[in-house]
Amino acid sequence: MNSRREAEPLVLGIETSCDETGIGIVRGTTLLADALASSVDEHARFGGVVPEVASRAHLEAMVPTMRRALSEAGVSLADVDAIAVTAGPGLAGALLVGVAAAKGYAVAADKPLYGVNHLAAHVAVDTLEHGPLPEPAIGLLVSGGHTSLLQVDDLTGDVTPLGATIDDAAGEAFDKVARLLGLPFPGGPPIDRAARDGAADAIGFPRGLTAAKDQAAHRYDFSFSGLKTAVARWVEARQQAGEPVPVADVAASFQESVADVLTAKAVAACRERGVSTLVIGGGVAANSRLRAVAERRCEAAGVTLRIPRPKLCTDNGSMVAALGSRLVSAGVAPSRLDLPADSALPVSVPSV
Ligand code: KG4
Ligand code: ZN
């Protein structure tokens, strides 16, 4: 191991904002371990994450997941330079389990603690795959609870929201449309799969907030609730007529509308703001069609596209460790030991 690598911080990250208990370990921008325990199966029959069930599952998974991460990385807690934890946004009870555990580990092992923003961590995780992020960059963050377009001048302290969804998040739209089509929760992966056998141009679903009249007030904002309603109406009309619902075509046409709007607005933001890097993060960034359309449009616009591999797009601990590592390297002071879990932490606050 060379000396530069040795000098890079060894950071452990803990993620519990939703239904995944994730513990990741990184050295600088090198991923050493990514241990994950999911309670998704316990929520599936409810069609959405049940906060109390998620909190209890985090509690049960915390210690075994920590053991797995440390053994996978071949390190002990004493070797770690800092502990990072998701402080928000997310489910309050779920966040509290991670924050309390992180405080316990930090005190027991006498390590600095960093409370980090889950949304900024979805962007930071890309450094584990593509190395340091060129800044400024435009960030497109698409998850189950958030959809935001960001100007990232410095991921450790200067993130400016350009726009966001005015109703449903992109992932929420996938989850709701999957339910309509009788596909399981979470809806993104089954829609992605079903769409492979369908035609993206079979049904002309609406493109939210892309009309000329929306360009002034909502240029970089998104709306997916009209799309969801349009899909519901289309499916109902078929059912009422006693005709079978072409699930693959509906999935492909719905997915096309989401991918089209997200990438068009993200690339427009790059062009209009003179920024040459686009980074996409969050669970919906795992979507194969979104990735393909983004690639084509970025290439045409001369924009460098960065999207982490699908496994790093959905919630995990290494994204938290990646942002923690960046904060340590930038010399940002650790958080206080009484740091709160903030379920509504704004995207512009990378660490608390
Ligand atoms: O970032 P994430 O794991 O958790 C949150 O922070 O919300 O995102 C979860 C969301 C879910 O709505 C899920 O349906 C969606 O990401 N998702 C996908 C895909 N994989 C996960 N959406 C579309 N296509 C996918 N392949
Ligand atoms: Zn997330």
Image (spheres, helix red, strand yellow):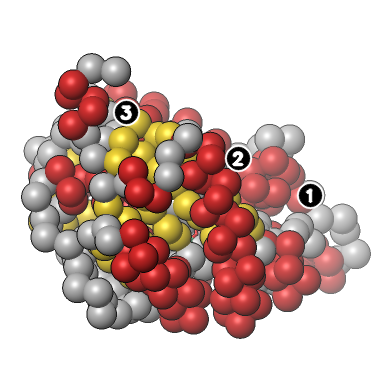
Q: How far apart are the alpha carbons under marks 2 and 1?
A: 12 Å
Q: Which of the two labelled residues, at mark 3 and mark 2, occupies the earlier sequence position? A: 3
Cα distance in 3D space between marks 3 and 2: 30 Å
Describe residue 274's horizontal placement relative to residue 73 as left or right.
Answer: left
Please tell me which residue is depicted at 29% across the width and 24% down the height of the picture: 300
Quarter of the image where one finds residue 166: bottom left
Residue at disc 3, CB closer than 8 Å to ligand 1: no
Foreground label between 3 and 2: 3
Task: Tell me the tag on residue 246.
Answer: 1
Residue drawn at (78%, 71%), measured in percent from left and top?
45
Q: Is mark 1 within 8 Å of ligand 1?
A: no
Whether 205 is drawn above or below 249: the answer is below
Residue toward you, 348 or 253 = 348
Q: Is residue 327 visible?
A: yes
Q: Which residue is mark 2?
A: 200
Is disc 2 placed on a helix, strand or loop?
loop
The residue located at (63%, 68%) in the rendering is 60
Q: Is mark 2 within 8 Å of ligand 1?
A: no
In the picture, the disc for residue 130 is 3
Kindly identify the amino acid type of the residue bearing the numbered disc 2: Ala
Residue 270 at least partly seen? no
Q: Amino acid at mark 3?
A: His
Classify mark 3: helix, strand or loop: helix
Between 147 and 112, the one lying in front of the other is 112
> Where is 156 relative to 53, above or below?
above
Image quarter of the N terminus: top left
